[in-house]
Structure formats: C-alpha cells, structure tokens
Image (cartoon, helix red, strand yellow):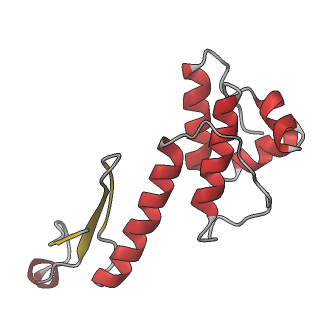
Amino acid sequence: MQAFKASGHGGQKVNKTSSAVRIVHEPSGIEATSSETRSQHENRHHALKKLRMKIALEIRSEEKSAIDNFQISMSNPAYPLFVALLLDELHRFGFRLAESAKSLGLSTGQLVRHLERDPELWQKVNSERKTNGLKQLLKN
C-alpha cells in the first residue's frame, strides 16, 4: 500500500495531505487506487474493495468451484469471491452458458440474470466470449 497526494480539484486540502491510496497485488501486479474521500482510511477501504474485484475478474483457477449462495449482494464483502468462482466455472466451459449453468445447477436464464446485475462482470464475460469466438450476450 502506498499513500500519495491526490491530483485534481480540492484546493489547499488536496495539496497538504496524502489521503489517496494505491494498493498493488505483488504476485499479479494488479493495482487499484482510490482518492474519492479526504480520509486515507476510507480510501484504503475503497482501494482494497476495487483490488479484490479486479483480482476476481482477472485471475482464474482450473479447479471446480463450489458456489453455495447465488443470492449474494454486490455490497457483500464476499462478492468478489463469488465473482471469481463464477468466472472460474465459466472459464472451465469456454464461457458457454448452457454447460456452465448446468454445472452450477442453474438454468441458462438464471445465470444470465446473475451476470446482468453487475455491469463489470457482464463486460468481462462478453469480452471472454468474444475471445472464445462466441456471440456477445445481449441485455433484455
């Protein structure tokens, strides 16, 4: 973690305090920054939340995932883990929804609804589907 002075609007306060935060995940080099608030503590919390989501979107595991709760809220601290497990399962089946949904014990429609509720997840899945030569998903 590194604290630094934020740039941009904010006047004298921005120039006097090192409240912006940058966190780097050393093994992968993935980093997240936050300078939304004047509190370094709050910015650290926001940056860590962003970092967890970036790691969930980028790093895949080949092992079979076990997802117990599909009703998890996006504000739940465990949500990035849910996203990682969901993407791992989609990755196992080449981002083909029918096979992934069956493996997860869901219908294809249920899986699509889970993906639709998170724009960042939706974009990642569509990007991976395009890479795998599949059609992009369309929102209803």
Image coords of residue 52 (percent x, y) = 47, 59
User: Closer to the camera, 90 or 43?
Assistant: 90
- Image: 136 above or below 48: above
Q: Is 122 left, or right, of 37 in this rendering?
A: right
Image coords of residue 63 (percent x, y) = 65, 40
Image coords of residue 121 (percent x, y) = 60, 46
Q: Residue at x 79, y 47 (%)?
A: 113
Tally of numbered tags: 0
Q: Residue at x 46, y 51 (%)?
A: 55
Image coords of residue 42 (percent x, y) = 37, 81
Q: In which quarter of the image is residue 94?
A: top right
Q: Which residue is drawn at 49% across and 43% down?
A: 59
Q: Is 14 left, or right, of 41 in this rendering?
A: left
Q: Is 33 left, or right, of 49 in this rendering?
A: left
**Residue closest to the far top:** 133
Q: Which residue is drawn at 76% across and 54% down?
A: 67
Q: In which quarter of the image is residue 79?
A: bottom right
